[in-house]
Image (spheres, rainbow, N blue to C red):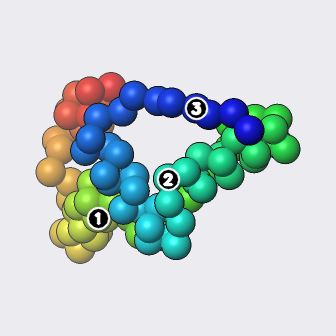
C-alpha cells in the first residue's frame, strides 16, 4: 500500500473533516474513495454536497422574489446589471 501526503491549510482541513464527518466518514476514507473513483471513471469525479443553496444563492433568490413582486429590478439597465456582476 502507498501513502500520499498533501499540504493544506488548517482551516480548509478542519472544514473538510467536518463535512466528511457529516457524511459518516473521515478524510482518509474520502481520499481513498476519490482515488478509486478517478480510476474507475477515468475522470476527476466525486461530487458530494449538501442539497441546500449557499448564502449567495439564498440572497439572489430573495432578490429575485422581490423583483417579481415589485415588477422592477434594482438595475436601470442590463448593462448596469452586467457591470455589477463584473461581466
Residue appearing at x 44%, y 67% in the figure: 21
Q: Which residue is mark 1?
A: 58
Between tags 1 and 3, which lies in front?
A: 3
Q: Give whichever of 59, 20 is nearer the camera.
A: 20
Q: Give percent across and percent down for residue 73.
A: 20, 54
Q: Which residue is mark 3?
A: 4
Mark toward the start of the polypeptide (3 vs 2):
3
At label 2, counting other C-alpha atoms closer than 10 Å, the crowd grade (few under 14, some 14-19, many 20 or more) is some
- SS under mark 1: helix
Q: Is residue 72 visible?
A: yes
Residue appearing at x 84%, y 44% in the figure: 40
Between tags 3 and 2, which lies in front?
A: 3
Q: Quadrant of the C terminus?
A: top left
Q: Which residue is most to the front? A: 1
Q: Is residue 60 visible?
A: no
Q: Which residue is mark 2?
A: 27
Q: Quadrant of the N terminus?
A: top right
Mark toward the start of the polypeptide (1 vs 2):
2
The circle drawn on residue 71 is none
Residue appearing at x 29%, y 64% in the figure: 58
Q: Give whichever of 39, 85 is nearer the camera.
A: 39
- SS under mark 2: helix
Q: Give percent across and percent down for residue 14.
A: 31, 52
Q: Give percent across and percent down for residue 5.
A: 51, 30
CB-based contact (under 8 Å), mark 1 and mark 3: no
Amino acid at each position: 500500500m502507498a501513502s500520499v501526503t498533501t499540504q493544506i491549510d488548517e482551516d480548509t482541513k478542519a472544514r473538510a473533516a467536518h463535512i466528511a464527518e457529516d457524511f459518516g466518514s473521515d478524510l482518509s476514507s474520502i481520499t481513498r474513495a476519490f482515488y478509486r473513483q478517478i480510476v474507475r471513471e477515468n475522470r476527476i469525479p466525486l461530487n458530494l454536497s449538501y442539497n441546500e443553496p449557499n448564502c449567495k444563492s439564498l440572497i439572489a433568490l430573495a432578490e429575485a422574489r422581490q423583483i417579481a413582486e415589485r415588477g422592477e429590478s434594482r438595475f436601470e439597465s442590463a448593462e448596469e446589471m452586467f457591470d455589477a456582476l463584473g461581466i
